[in-house]
Image (spheres, rainbow, N blue to C red):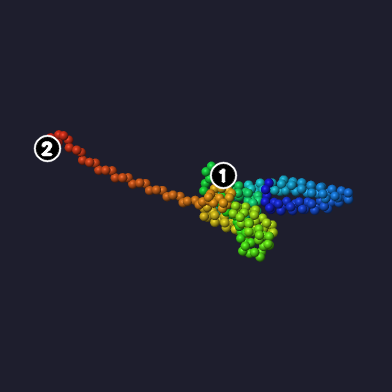
Amino acid sequence: METGYLGGLAAGVIAGVTTRALQRITVPARWRPLMADAAIPLVATLFTAVVFFRALVAPQIAQLNAWLYDKLVTLELTDHHLVLGLVLGLIVCCDFGGAVYKAAFAYALGGIDSYVPTLAHMTFMAVVVATGMVPALGMSLATGVRRKLFTETERNYGKVAWLLGLVPVPAAAVPFALRDLLRVIPASMAGGAVTGMLTMNFGSTMAVPFGGVFAAGQLGKPSPSPSPSPSPSPSPSPSPSPPAPSSRQVSRSR
């Protein structure tokens, strides 16, 4: 199950706590090498897998995805499209390609994965694609504008992160988030919320879920509904020509 880098951090914390607890167990000296090399890593890995996937991640992610889907459908059916764009932007940019992002992606993908997708569903897909560019592009721009706030390694990475942002790959911003989680995530979510609302307001559409700017041929804007053409006026009927004189009238006139 894909949980993103936040899930990886949680799994690392669980494994670390479990390992430290196992190291406190007192064993005879002859068993210590076996404990350190085999028993502790094996038990810590198994315990982390069971707790993480069976007790924490699997049921919680299933409930989260179902709750998010219901809320997104409610916003769609009640015509709160600007709010829907804001929420989609927040969801996409909160975990950079993790489980929460995949809930928004699955919602938008379900709309265009029909025989005849509507313009509204293609707009939802455009919102997800556009907001997916925000984390990597935003952090790449920040490394160039405020260079003093980043290390040399981050500045070098920012020179190539923009290319991943154009695809888009939200996970390209993970190296920045790992160093400064409490600033990178709120900033990315704020940018995603604004981008989502603007994309929804402009009515942009995207017919494919991947590619970003490289799929610009599938990007469009709904055209206004054509006004009904006026019905053609009826052409005037030709006036009837006078009847030709009969042969009897001709003979009498003679």
Q: Residue furthest left?
A: 254
Residue 189 in view (yes/no): no
Residue at point 72% right, 48% down? 52
Give the number of marks: 2
Task: Judge from the rendering whether residue 232 lies leftward or rightward of residue 158; answer left or right.
Answer: left
Q: Secondary structure at mark 2?
A: helix
Residue 206 at x, y percent in the picture:
54, 50
Q: Amino acid at mark 1?
A: Asp
Residue 138 at least partly seen: yes
Most foreground residue, 30 or 246 = 30
Q: Residue at x 62, y 54 (%)?
A: 164
Question: What is the number of the mark on residue 113?
Answer: 1
> Percent position (x, y) of residue 187?
63, 59
Q: In whole angstroms, how far apart are the C-alphas of marks 1 and 2?
A: 86 Å
Q: Nearer the viewer, residue 208 or 60?
A: 208
The crowd level at tag 1 (other Cα within 10 Å; few <14, some 14-19, many 20+) is some
Residue beneath disc 2:
253
Tell which circle, 1 or 2, labels the residue nearer the N-terminal end.
1
Image spot of residue 78 (x, y percent): 54, 50
Instruction: Name the side, left or right, on which 168 lies relative to 231.
Output: right
